[in-house]
Image: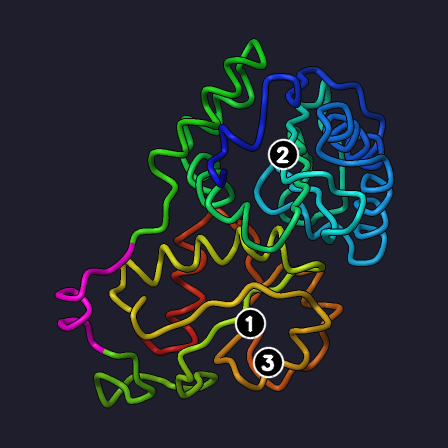
Amino acid sequence: MGKLRNLISVDAIELDVAADDWRAAVMAAGDLLVQTGATQPAYTDAMLATIDEHGPYIVIAPGFALAHARPDESVERTGLSFARLAAPVEFGSDDNDPVTIVMGLAAADATQHQQALAALAGVLADGDKRAQLDTAATPEAVLDVLASGDATGAIKTVSPASAASAAKPSAEPAQDDVDLTGTVASKGHILTVCGNGVGTSIFLKNTLEQVLGKWGWAPFFTVEATDTISAKGKASEADLVLTSGAIADSLGDLGVPVEVIRDFTSQQEIDGALRRRYAV
């Protein structure tokens, strides 16, 4: 159920969508969710209200927005939609505007769609596949590009042998001249945060786990995707928080470092954030 191909159909994909502003763009993605039976119209209203409350945090990569709201009774089933705009639209994101693609996400629960978001992250992080989403001539072609992520988007696990040979992260510098200013002693826990804890925070969690896997640190860390309210209570248990600029502004002082990630598909950007905090 969690694969991209199982969560989006050709009928949920529309190209050359006319949208005068971000509201119209989100409504187009929401309408596709309604038309394909994933949601009731109230869910589209909830997506708009979430952006009104938290700002354009759904714009998680250059030109790409993932619109979503909390799971509620207006969600009939977990599903995705894809609206490619006829002309770019400004959402108010300093880093990733203008937006050309808006995908709608309806989550029936907090877990069913995680594998699909991992696959989607892999597609968006691949320059060639991202370009194909912008130029595909038909909904069928778009679906083929998205479904290609199912083969490569799964989180890579670290084998026991690799775990045994991996060095556990430590606050101690490897060399005497390493500057630990601003770093934290590891609790083995990192939070990724968005407005609702079921969409962009899971997307960011997936990319972060890919980086931890490459480092060989995955056995020593848990990554928790959560919402803004829960993050304030959970922050003391974490080393740091990764989130968007819009969400960081609303979180205030959590008592732990907050790293703003501009492109949620960028392993390089997340790698840099971890290196700053752990003096690697």
Task: Tell me which corner region of the image, top left, top right, bottom left or bottom right, holds residue 241.
Answer: bottom right
Q: Of tags 1 and 2, which is closer to the observer?
A: 2
Which callout, 1 or 2, points at the residue further toward the start of the chain?
2
Marks 3/2: CA distance? 30 Å
Determine the secondary structure under disc 3.
helix
Would residue 173 be found to the left or right of residue 96 on screen? left
Residue shown at 51% from the left, 80% from the top: 238
Q: Of tags 3 and 2, which is closer to the observer?
A: 2
Q: Is residue 194 above or below residue 165?
A: above
Determine which residue is flagged by label 2. 80
Q: Is residue 172 above or below residue 234?
A: below
Marks 3/1: CA distance? 7 Å
Determine which residue is flagged by label 3. 235
Dot 1 surroundings within 10 Å: few (below 14), some, or many (20 or more)? Answer: many
Does the stretch in magenta take in 160? yes
For badge 1, the amino acid type reads Val
